[in-house]
Image: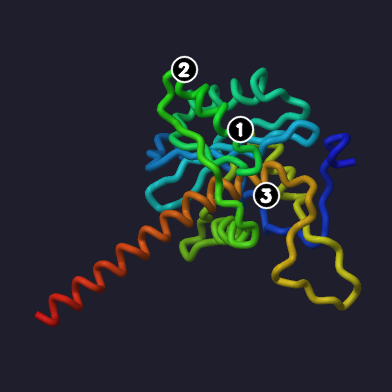
């Protein structure tokens, strides 16, 4: 019913804890929010929906989902690429992290971006599923100051619906879940696009920070030795 008719229902064993109520995860960014970076994620599809999501990253490394594209049976050249171009213009997206399973689609998107003079570029995303889920779950968690690291605009109705249906396989009574288990492959199109964008961007940032920290430690040790 979910994949064919587009119906979404709540399940036990949900992958993410997502609160749509007041003080939860659904809200607009404050007026005048200055984003340090704007990124997007793309999950290619045709029979299953294609999904593109846009995030603004503020100075506190908080992600705000501002827009989405979500459609079944959409042609790449006729619909998907033009919709991504429109999202790029509207939100000033700097980079699109795309599902790596369709490299020719990434080439086509880059060609279209260049053709219309947009500086954004498309890249193959990091498709590490479990680390990616951990990245998104960490952002959804409540911070020590009571805020969240990830918010979703109320206009992103398909993304919000998928948070309420993205689940692990059902377990027999009393069974414990394997930490290496992957979620069910349905109702995951906006979820994959979200993971592509946030995990690829933030894991890359974490690696850079770790490298710089190591270089600073080495420089301090070298200074002490002298």
The residue furthest bottom is 225
Picture quarter containing residue 207?
Answer: bottom left
Q: In the image, residue 132 lies at what x, y percent?
A: 59, 57
How many other residues sit within 10 Å of disc 2, few (<14), some (14-19) or many (≥20)? few
Mark 2 vs mark 1: which is more N-terminal? 1
Q: Quick one: 185 or 55, which is closer to the camera?
A: 185
Of circles 2 and 1, the one toward us is: 1
Where is 46 relative to 132, above or below?
Answer: above
Provide the residue designation for mark 1.
104
Q: In the image, residue 2 lies at what x, y percent?
A: 85, 41
How many other residues sit within 10 Å of disc 3, few (<14), some (14-19) or many (≥20)? few
User: Which quadrant is the N terminus positioned in?
Assistant: top right
Provide the residue designation for mark 2.
116
Provide the residue designation for mark 3.
21
Where is 175 relative to 108, above or below?
Answer: below
Mark 3 vs mark 1: which is more N-terminal? 3
User: Which quadrant is the C terminus positioned in?
Assistant: bottom left
How many other residues sit within 10 Å of disc 1, few (<14), some (14-19) or many (≥20)? few
Horizontal relation, residue 222 to residue 10: left or right: left
> Disc 3 versus disc 1: distance between alpha carbons?
40 Å
Q: In the image, residue 210 lies at what x, y percent?
A: 37, 65
> Disc 3 versus disc 2: distance between alpha carbons?
40 Å
- At 46% from the left and 62% from the top, the residue drawn is 145
**Whether residue 144 can be seen here:** yes
| Residue 214 badge | none
């Amino acid at each position: 019913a979910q994949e064919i008719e587009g119906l979404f229902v709540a399940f036990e064993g949900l992958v993410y804890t997502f609160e749509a109520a007041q003080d939860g995860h659904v809200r607009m960014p404050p007026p005048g929010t200055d984003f340090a970076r704007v990124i997007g994620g793309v999950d290619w599809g045709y029979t299953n929906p294609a999904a593109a999501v846009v995030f603004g990253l503020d100075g506190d490394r908080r992600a705000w989902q501002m827009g989405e594209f979500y459609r079944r049976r959409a042609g790449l050249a006729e619909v998907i690429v033009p919709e991504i171009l429109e999202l790029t213009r509207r939100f000033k997206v700097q980079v699109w992290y795309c599902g790596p399973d369709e490299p020719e689609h990434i080439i086509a998107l880059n060609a279209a971006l260049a053709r219309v003079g947009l500086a954004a570029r498309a890249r193959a995303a990091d498709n590490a599923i479990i680390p990616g889920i951990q990245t998104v779950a960490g952002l959804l968690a409540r911070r020590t100051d009571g805020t969240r690291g990830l918010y979703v605009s109320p206009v992103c109705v398909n993304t919000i619906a998928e948070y309420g249906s993205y689940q692990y396989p059902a377990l027999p009574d009393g069974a414990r879940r394997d930490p290496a288990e992957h979620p069910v492959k349905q109702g995951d199109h906006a979820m994959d696009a979200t993971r592509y964008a946030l995990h690829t961007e933030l894991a890359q940032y974490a690696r850079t920070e770790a490298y710089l920290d190591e270089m600073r430690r080495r420089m301090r040790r070298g200074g002490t030795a002298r």
